[in-house]
Image (cartoon, helix red, strand yellow):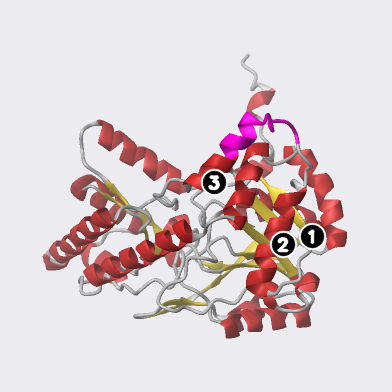
Amino acid sequence: MSREPPSTKLSPVMDEIIGETAFAYLAVARKLREEGKRVISFGIGQPDYVTPSHIREAAKKALDEGFTGYTETAGIPELREAIAWYLNSRYGAGVTPSEVIVTTGAKTAIFIGMAAYLRPGDEVVIPDPSYYAYAQVAKLFGARPVYVPMRFVEGEGFRLDIEAIENAVTERTRMIVVNNPHNPTGNVFPPDQVEALLDIARRKDLLILSDEIYDNFLYQGATFKSFLSTPDWRDHVVYVNGFSKTFSMTGWRLGYLVVREEAAKRIVDLAVTVYSCPPSIAQKAGVAALKGDWSPVREMIQEFEARAKILYENLKEAPGIEAYMPEGAFYMFPRVARLLEKTGLNIEQFVEKLLYEEGVLVLPGTSFPEKIGREHVRISFATSRSEVAEGSKIIAAYAERLWKQPTT
């Protein structure tokens, strides 16, 4: 009689966890390339720039000096000081180095931030669409994600529905998650919406997990207000940021969490249990990133804004595609509902046909992860200007052909 081995009996919580589908689509694109098909990928949320040379040199120097052992769990003092300096000089936050915990990427900051505060049975309010990981981490700690649809405004993109967020708050609500600038929409939420969320947090005694990993990617004069810029941030804000996007350091795995000092002292005990410490040489590189030459960052962001304009110009007249000019990050999340209705396709089928027939990869909105995404695709313009131009023209031409087909 066969017996199921214990190694197959995973915790029931694993039935609730969903992986990042972006990587699954990237694997398909890679296979198609190996078969000789040209693929333009708008899938990955990773700058196509190499980490600037002065940052790489700082890491090399650390290696040459033998700085390869464990460090303080919260991060080396000079990096925590540099992070505090950056946040204070930019946002007037008054952060002290003792309120900074350096992590192995912003995902780990999200993980330990939620682990430290969420309790079984809590509810976490998350705007829909959203980055997939927030809900997965919440579920891991026994909390329930509560999705609140954002408003899609034709020609502008997405805005938070503040009234709906407040209506979603119950006695069980513990946290509201905000990613600003926003993945997957590429929108920047205006200062009055940031203030409104803080007002809800104050009146309802809630936490706001503020993920500001894209805070330097701002286009066409978009106004960005950090949740750290309010004097009472320590009472309500769990702040997440990192180096992956701004400094094109995705593979270095370096992020940080900022919380009030009393909480930080205790969260460090959790951090050491999870990852011991951040990578030593990556931390030295992080100091050089923050305190060194920012001109490569500025040049990259100018280039990304130019790409955003090309993407918008090529898609704005495409039939069945409701495009808008991104305000931040490096994404557009256009609505394609009319194309889907015209063709009878669902969003996954539309994405697969575009990839296999036209060689262009976009991500289905259902990767982000609830209901609104069924009518949208995410387009990342973190690829070369020439590929943005060519790929967006292919999408527009494909939409034109689908639009002219007889209704199914």
| Gap in angstroms between the C-alphas marked 3 and 2 | 19 Å
Other residues around mark 3 within 10 Å, as few (<14) / some (14–19) / many (≥20)? many
> Which x, y percent locates residue 212?
59, 64
For the N terminus, the image quarter is top right
> Which x, y percent locates residue 40?
27, 48
Q: Earlier in the sequence, mark 1 or mark 2?
A: 2
Residue at (26, 36) in percent of width and height: 33
Q: Disc 2 designates what residue?
A: 84
Under mark 2, the amino acid is Ala
Query: Which stretch is magenta?
Result: 59-70
Under mark 3, the amino acid is Ile
- The quarter of the picture where residue 282 lies is top right
Asked if marks 1 and 2 touch (Cβ < 8 Å), the reply is: yes
Q: Earlier in the sequence, mark 3 or mark 2?
A: 3
Disc sitting over residue 99 in the figure: 1
- Is residue 141 visible to the viewer in this orientation of the structure? no
Under mark 1, the amino acid is Glu
Q: Disc 3 designates what residue?
A: 55
> Which x, y percent locates residue 227?
66, 73
Q: Is residue 27 left or right of residue 95?
A: left
- The magenta stretch spans residue 403: no
Q: Earlier in the sequence, mark 1 or mark 3?
A: 3
Residue at (62, 79) in percent of width and height: 194
